[in-house]
Image (cartoon, rainbow, N blue to C red):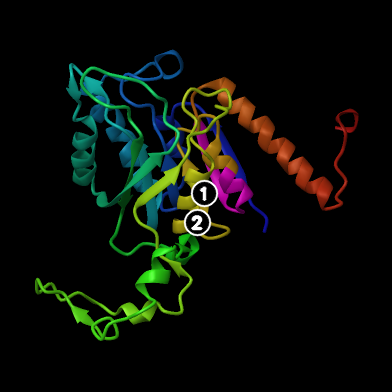
C-alpha cells in the first residue's frame, strides 16, 4: 500500500494550523515533560504547563477525526519533595476543551535505571492517557491480543458446574462470566499495562521511547492507510513506525537537527523500498 509521510519544521502551535480539520486517525506523542529537556526544548515550568499546552490541545482536537484517538505519553515530576499536579490539571483542562478522558494505560519500563533516593523508589512506569472526541471511536482490539498463558492449562483443565454457565456477579452489577467460553481460545485481550523495555540506543535524542510502544497503539487504533500524527516528533520513532506499518504520517519538530535527521532517514527508506521493488532509483549524479 502506498503511504505518505509529511514532516513539518517549526513550533506545533503554528504548524498544526496547516493540517485540515477532522483528518487524523491517531495522535500519538510525548511532549517535553515539565522542566525537562531544557537544552533542547527550553523546559516549561510545571506551574505554566497547562497554559502552554492548552492551545496545542485545542488544535489537536480540531485535526482529529470524530472516530480518532489521542494518546498522550506524560509523567508527573517531583517538585519540592512531592509529585506536581500539572498532569492532573491538564486532564481537567482538556475535558473543559471538549476532550473525553476515555482510558489510561501504563507503560511499565522493564529496564529502568537503578538508583536510590531518600524518600522514594525509582520510576519504572509512565502514563499513556487516552482522549477522544466522541464515545464511538475506532478500536481494533483483536490486533493486540496476547497468548492465553500458562494459567489457562490449569484453570480450564477441570471446570465446575458454575464455570459451565453464566455466573452472575454477586454484587448485583449485571455482569457475569462463563469460563467454558474460553476452552478453545488461544489468545486473550491484553490489560491496560504495556510491558516494554526502554530504548537502549537513544537515536541521538534525549527522550526516545521504544518502537514497540507506538506500534502497539497504532495497531490498536488504526488500520493500513490511516493517518498518524506526532506534533512533538523528536527522533521520529512514531513516524518511522507508522511508515513501516503502511500508515500515512505527519510529524512536527521544532529542533532542526532532529527534523533533518528523520527527513534523511525517511528519504533513504523510500529509496530502499523503490530499489527492492525493482524501480530505477537515480544516483546523486543523475539528480
| Residue at image coords 31%, 41% | 58
| Residue 274 shows up from this direction | yes
Q: Quarter of the image containing the N terminus?
A: bottom right
How far is disc 1 from disc 2 in space, using C-alphas? 6 Å
Q: Left of 140 or right of it: where is 178?
A: left
Which residues lie in the magenta part?
241-252
Relative to the observer, which residue lies in front, 23 or 120? 120
Kindly identify which residue carries mark 1: 215
The percent position of residue 2, horizontal first and vertical second, equals 67, 55
| Residue at image coords 54%, 33% | 8
Farthest residue, direction top: 39
The percent position of residue 22, horizontal first and vertical second, equals 41, 53
| Residue at image coords 36%, 62% | 137
Tell me where residue 12 sits by quadrant.
top left
The percent position of residue 277, horizontal first and vertical second, equals 82, 53
Based on the picture, tell me whether residue 76 belongs to the magenta stretch.
no
| Residue at image coords 54%, 37% | 237
Kindly identify which residue carries mark 2: 219
Q: Quarter of the image containing the C terminus?
A: top right
Instruction: Check disc 2 and report its element: helix, strand or loop.
Output: helix
| Residue 66 shows up from this direction | no
Few, some or many residues within 10 Å of mark 1 (<14, 14–19, 20+) = some
Amino acid at each position: 500500500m502506498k503511504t505518505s509521510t509529511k514532516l513539518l519544521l517549526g513550533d506545533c502551535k503554528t504548524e498544526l494550523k496547516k493540517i485540515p480539520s477532522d483528518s487524523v486517525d491517531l495522535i500519538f506523542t510525548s511532549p517535553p515533560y515539565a522542566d525537562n529537556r531544557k537544552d533542547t526544548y527550553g523546559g516549561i515550568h510545571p506551574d505554566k504547563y497547562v497554559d502552554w499546552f492548552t492551545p496545542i490541545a485545542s488544535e489537536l482536537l480540531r485535526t482529529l477525526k470524530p472516530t480518532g484517538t489521542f494518546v498522550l505519553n506524560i509523567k508527573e515530576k517531583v517538585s519540592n519533595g512531592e509529585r506536581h499536579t500539572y498532569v492532573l490539571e491538564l486532564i481537567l483542562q482538556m475535558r473543559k476543551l471538549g476532550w473525553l478522558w476515555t482510558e489510561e494505560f501504563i507503560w511499565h519500563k522493564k529496564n529502568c535505571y537503578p538508583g536510590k533516593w531518600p524518600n522514594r523508589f525509582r520510576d519504572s512506569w509512565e502514563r499513556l492517557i487516552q482522549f477522544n472526541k466522541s464515545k464511538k471511536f475506532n478500536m481494533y482490539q483483536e490486533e493486540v491480543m496476547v497468548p492465553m498463558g500458562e494459567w489457562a492449562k490449569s484453570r480450564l483443565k477441570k471446570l465446575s458446574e458454575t464455570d459451565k454457565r453464566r455466573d452472575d456477579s454477586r454484587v448485583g452489577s449485571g455482569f457475569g462470566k462463563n469460563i467454558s467460553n474460553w476452552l478453545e481460545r488461544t489468545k486473550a485481550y491484553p490489560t491496560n499495562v504495556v510491558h516494554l523495555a526502554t530504548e537502549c540506543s537513544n537515536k541521538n535524542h534525549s527522550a526516545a521511547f521504544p518502537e514497540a510502544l507506538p506500534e502497539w497503539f497504532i495497531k490498536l487504533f488504526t488500520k493500513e492507510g490511516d493517518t498518524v500524527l506526532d506534533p512533538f516528533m523528536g527522533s521520529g520513532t512514531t513516524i518511522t513506525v507508522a511508515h513501516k506499518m503502511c500508515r500515512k504520517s505527519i510529524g512536527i519538530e521544532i529542533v532542526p537537527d532532529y527534523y533533518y535527521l528523520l527527513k534523511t532517514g525517511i528519504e533513504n527508506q523510500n529509496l530502499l523500498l523503490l530499489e527492492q521493488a525493482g524501480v530505477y532509483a537515480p544516483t546523486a549524479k543523475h539528480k
